[in-house]
């Protein structure tokens, strides 16, 4: 799954007074060393998410997508279960102020994972991730009616240009990608809703609580779909890959949380597009898929639009019109 601007979900700052630095040296460490660590952690996250998508595409040649999705969440829960059973913080994680929204967010996570795995099953990795990166533009478009964060004319122009970039990649009706590209666009749309639900929950539940609820619908609610199409993996290697999906995905989300704890979102957002490099390289090395020039042109338009939106958000935060 492509990485988006998902800051960790912490208690309101008023409930956690910040520690006072004991010296000027500690201030330097907080303002300079931490952002570097955050950037490195985010780069690691994009690498892990690329590994997840690559593994899903490889497994798709032998196994049904629903089975891969379900096992991604089964192994995710196996990875994190010791924390929730053996630590005091983990045992209380199920207590949520918005359990209904937590379950909805978990369902959105499962849906976007399913659609994304379908996308990488049929598309080149570079094409899938380039289309998926339209998600921040969808977030900006939906933030008005859902969060009352209305975009100004310049940001709307960036949103429209970004969608034009997707049309450049897919080239509908002129010999471009097949209709299966709609899976990637649908995955980006659902992920945008997932991101908005994450923003809402940030003011109600802690990181640990949200992390607890994230895989629940995938583990329990998606079980009938995964079991119904179950096919025994052909060998031990495919079994290992199935379990690695959850481990790689879970570690990716953990690194992302740690990254946003060490650096602010404005510092990290530009580096999320490094996943385009990883996905392109993985597609070439593992599957021999060389993206077309249209993919590069369209991806450049989508990325430029996303970065412009990020730039405008920083200006808005400083009180300038959007």
Image: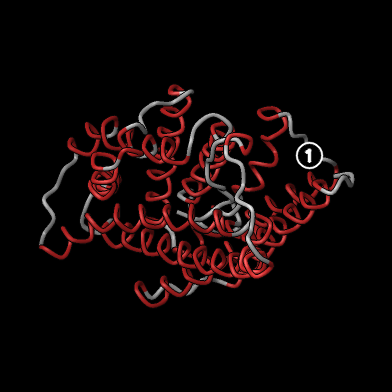
Question: Is residue 298 among what the camera can see?
Answer: no
Instruction: In the displayed orientation, state which residue is furthest to the front.
Output: 22
Which residue is more in the foreground, 143 or 78?
78
Q: Position of residue 256 (x, y in %)?
A: 48, 55
Give the vertical position of 147 relative to 19 (above or below).
above
Callout 1: SS: loop
Give the vertical position of 243 relative to 98 (above or below).
below
Q: Position of residue 42 (x, y in %)?
A: 52, 63
Q: Which residue carries the number 1 mark?
A: 151
Which residue is more in the foreground, 75 or 206?
206
**Residue pictured at 51% horizontal, 57% vertical:** 177
Give the vertical position of 259 relative to 101 (above or below).
below
State left or right for residue 128 relative to residue 51: right
Q: How many marks?
A: 1
**Residue pictured at 41% horizontal, 54% vertical:** 254
Q: Position of residue 209 (x, y in %)?
A: 41, 35
Q: Position of residue 214 (x, y in %)?
A: 39, 38
Which residue is more in the foreground, 126 or 215?
215
**Residue pictured at 37% horizontal, 64% vertical:** 51
Give the vertical position of 106 relative to 305 (above or below).
above
State left or right for residue 118 relative to residue 12: left
Question: Is residue 137 among what the camera can see?
Answer: yes
Which residue is more in the foreground, 34 or 286?
34
- 10 Å crowding of disc 1: few (<14), some (14-19), many (20+): many
**Residue pictured at 85% horizontal, 44% vertical:** 322
Task: Give the colour scheme shown.
Answer: secondary structure
């Amino acid at each position: 799954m492509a990485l988006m601007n998902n800051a960790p979900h912490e208690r309101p700052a008023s409930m956690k007074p910040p520690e006072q630095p004991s010296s000027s040296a500690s201030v330097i460490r907080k303002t300079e060393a931490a952002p570097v660590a955050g950037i490195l952690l985010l780069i690691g996250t994009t690498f892990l998410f690329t590994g997840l998508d690559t593994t899903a595409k490889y497994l798709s040649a032998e196994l049904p997508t629903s089975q891969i999705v379900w096992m991604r969440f089964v192994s995710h829960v196996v990875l994190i279960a010791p924390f929730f059973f053996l630590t005091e913080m983990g045992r209380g994680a199920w207590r949520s102020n918005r359990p209904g929204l937590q379950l909805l967010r978990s369902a959105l996570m499962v849906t976007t994972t399913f659609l994304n795995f379908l996308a990488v099953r049929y598309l080149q990795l570079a094409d899938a991730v380039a289309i998926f990166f339209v998600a921040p533009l969808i977030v900006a478009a939906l933030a008005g009616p859902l969060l009352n964060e209305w975009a100004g004319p310049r940001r709307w122009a960036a949103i429209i240009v970004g969608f034009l970039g997707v049309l450049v990649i897919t080239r509908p009706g002129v010999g471009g990608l097949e209709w299966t590209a709609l899976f990637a666009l649908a995955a980006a749309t659902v992920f945008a809703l997932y991101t908005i639900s994450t923003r809402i929950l940030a003011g109600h539940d802690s990181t640990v609580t949200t992390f607890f609820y994230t895989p629940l619908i995938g583990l329990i609610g998606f079980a009938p779909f995964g079991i119904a199409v179950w096919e025994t993996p052909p060998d031990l290697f495919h079994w290992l890959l199935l379990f690695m999906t959850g481990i790689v995905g879970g570690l990716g989300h953990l690194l992302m949380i740690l990254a946003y704890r060490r650096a602010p979102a404005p510092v990290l957002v530009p580096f999320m597009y490094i996943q385009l490099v990883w996905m392109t390289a993985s597609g070439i090395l593992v599957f021999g898929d060389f993206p077309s020039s249209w993919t590069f042109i369209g991806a450049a338009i989508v990325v430029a639009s996303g970065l412009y939106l990020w730039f405008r958000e920083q200006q808005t935060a400083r009180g300038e019109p959007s």
